[in-house]
Amino acid sequence: MKKKSSLLLFSFLLVLVLALVGCTKDEEAGTGTEEEGGTTTNSTGGSASTSSSILETVASRGKIIAGINDALPGFGYVDSDGKNTGFDIEFAKAIAAGVLGDAEAVEYRPLSAQERFTAVQTGEVDVLIRNTTWTTNRDSEVGLNFAPVTFYDGQGIMVPADSGIDSLEDLEGARIGVETGTTTELNLADQMRAKGINFEAVVFDSADAVVAAYESGSIDAWTTDKSGLVSRQSIMQDPSAHKILTETISKEPLAPAVKGGDDKWFDAVTWIVFATIQAEEFGITSANVDDFLDDENPDIKRLLGAEGNLGEQLGLPADFGYQVIKQVGNYGEIYDRHLGPDTVFKLERGLNDLYTNGGLLYSAPFR
């Protein structure tokens, strides 16, 4: 009886081992369930797609949806013809040109400082290009991914020209306006505390409200990025009646942002921005880009899509770099059109110049 039981137990274990070996062979042959390239394949050969990239959504939709500012002259505003225009707007067009081959394939969604991050998180917009500072918290907890910096800025403070205020120390006891939902309030508090300066922060829901309070005299000063101060000063009733203090109280790297976790879309936006910077370094403009199509420089060939498969690697058309430059221009062209010496702002390039000219602009290699 004991011998019979042992034989039964041995037979059972043998069957179990053979079954396990069979399962392993099936999995190695690809008949089991596995995930590959974002698609789940089951044992019957069917598949169920996982969530697609925004890049694929944009390609299918035929346009990008960009979150923008429509009330910041020079960067994002509505012109006299009712069209969105400005430095940031041009980068939205560059993305459309690179992804879709059409710089005009953009739907603009004006967003307030409070609305902007939620709009990215919920998918209301594909990309946020709205004078937004790249910070640790926004990169991590808020869940954004930031493309290369398009404008290196810093926070400043505006005061009436006849106020007698020439430095931060002169703001002792002042009422200073700030917009909620921005980095400016914390920056101001940090700097004033570090210098032991007492002041009152007056918080407003929008930039328009801050400026209105400042111009009415209900606050003594207001603060935001220096680019924003210059922009707003240009449309004040008497621009010469105001001045911007020389101190820069923070670092404000402004960059396009996309929802975190979507590497394909993030890579596409990143390399399109880089294309505008690299084009300026090569001296390639919207006017002369066709002359470079036969250039023998392999780096230029790769940038313009005349050689290699960088576009394919990114999920973009082979000539995405060419389309960006031809339809929108290089970084310098974009800057000069909206902020440069022939505009009301006359902003010097400074940090926003190429690294070869002492600035911070530097493209990763197209290789």
Image (tube, grey):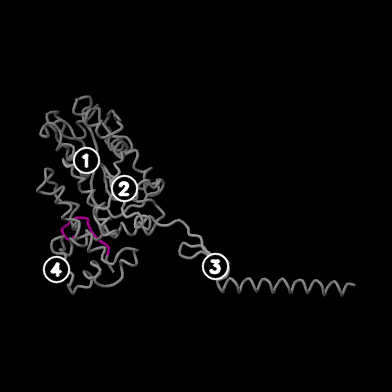
Please report the residue visible at 34 percent of the width from the left and 42 percent of the height from the top.
116
The label shown at residue 128 is 2
Mark 4 vs mark 1, CA separation in Å:
36 Å
Which residue type carries mark 2? Leu
Which-is-in-front pick, marks 4 and 1? 4
Q: Is residue 118 left or right of residue 171?
A: right
Quadrant, the C terminus? bottom left
- The residues colored magenta run 355-364
Q: Is residue 359 above or below residue 5?
A: above
Q: Secondary structure at mark 2?
A: strand
Q: Residues within 10 Å of mark 4 (few under 14, many from 20)?
A: few
Q: Which residue is mark 3?
A: 45
Which residue type carries mark 3? Gly
Q: Secondary structure at mark 3?
A: loop
In the image, is residue 273 part of the stretch drawn in magenta? no
The label shown at residue 291 is 4
Of labels 3 and 2, earlier in sequence is 3
Q: Which residue is mark 1?
A: 72
Please report the residue visible at 18 percent of the width from the left and 62 percent of the height from the top.
281
Of labels 4 and 3, earlier in sequence is 3
